[in-house]
Image (cartoon, helix red, strand yellow):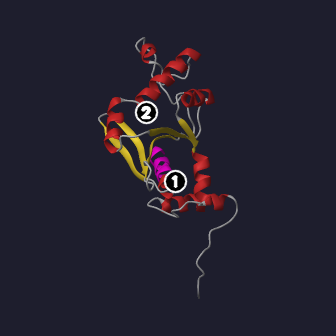
Amino acid sequence: MALLAEEIVEEWLNRQGYFTIRGIRLGVNEIDLVAVKFRSSESPVCRHVEVQASMRPVSYISKVPKAARKTGRAANSAARSPEELVKGVAEWVEGKFHAAKKRSLMETLWRGEWSSELVINNVKSEQEVALIAEHGITIHRLPEIVRELQNNEFPIKSAAGSDFIDLLQMGANTQQGALPDAPSSRR
């Protein structure tokens, strides 16, 4: 599911005019997407986008804080105190967006300002999403991105992921009762 969601987000960025790199490996870490859009006589717009697109979340986006894990708690434990949620989110944001290797790579691509953005679908805790946003992370909802792709009011009408988006739209139309055009058969 994660790779499919990343492909949708990449198509969304490409249609807005961003050049993208997806799935950058940095040892055991990964950057889901970096996107750069060049504008005449201005600095480029640079975005670091992570995608968390669960359909049926059973745990939080962030892990239980490291200190609690040292006592034997499972990293994805669903039971968390408010303090553990705050600390776990802070550690997750630091590792996901501010890790030295990630920042160094982005500085290599462009020594300017980079946004930090998270695309989500269904989540276990809206409180956790609010805490992530408090760290300066811009939150996008995957259903809204799909709606924007359906409206297709972008300067670029299709990119590498357009076939996948067409399949999504065909499935949505079929569910709403509209069948895709079928080729006529001649006898």
Residue 130 on the magenta segment:
no
Q: Which mark is residue 97?
A: 2
Q: Position of residue 125 (x, y in %)?
A: 60, 29
Q: Give the number of the disc on residue 12.
A: 1
Whether residue 9 is in magenta: the answer is yes
Q: Are marks 1 and 2 in contact (CB under 8 Å)?
A: no
Point 51% across, 22% down: residue: 77
The percent position of residue 32, horizontal first and vertical second, equals 42, 42
From where the camera sits, is residue 171 visible? no
Q: Quadrant of the C terminus?
A: bottom right
Mark 1 to mark 2: distance in Å? 21 Å
Q: Secondary structure at mark 1?
A: helix
Secondary structure at badge 2 equals helix
Closer-to-camera residue (5/115): 115
**For the view shown, which residue lies furthest in the top direction?**
71
Q: Is residue 42 left or right of residue 133?
A: left
Q: Residue drawn 37% across and 38% down?
A: 30
Q: Nearer the viewer, residue 65 or 93?
A: 93
Magenta stretch in the rendered image: 1-10
Q: Is residue 131 above or below residue 48?
A: above
Residue 142 in the image: above or below residue 134? below
Q: Nearer the viewer, residue 30 or 39?
A: 39
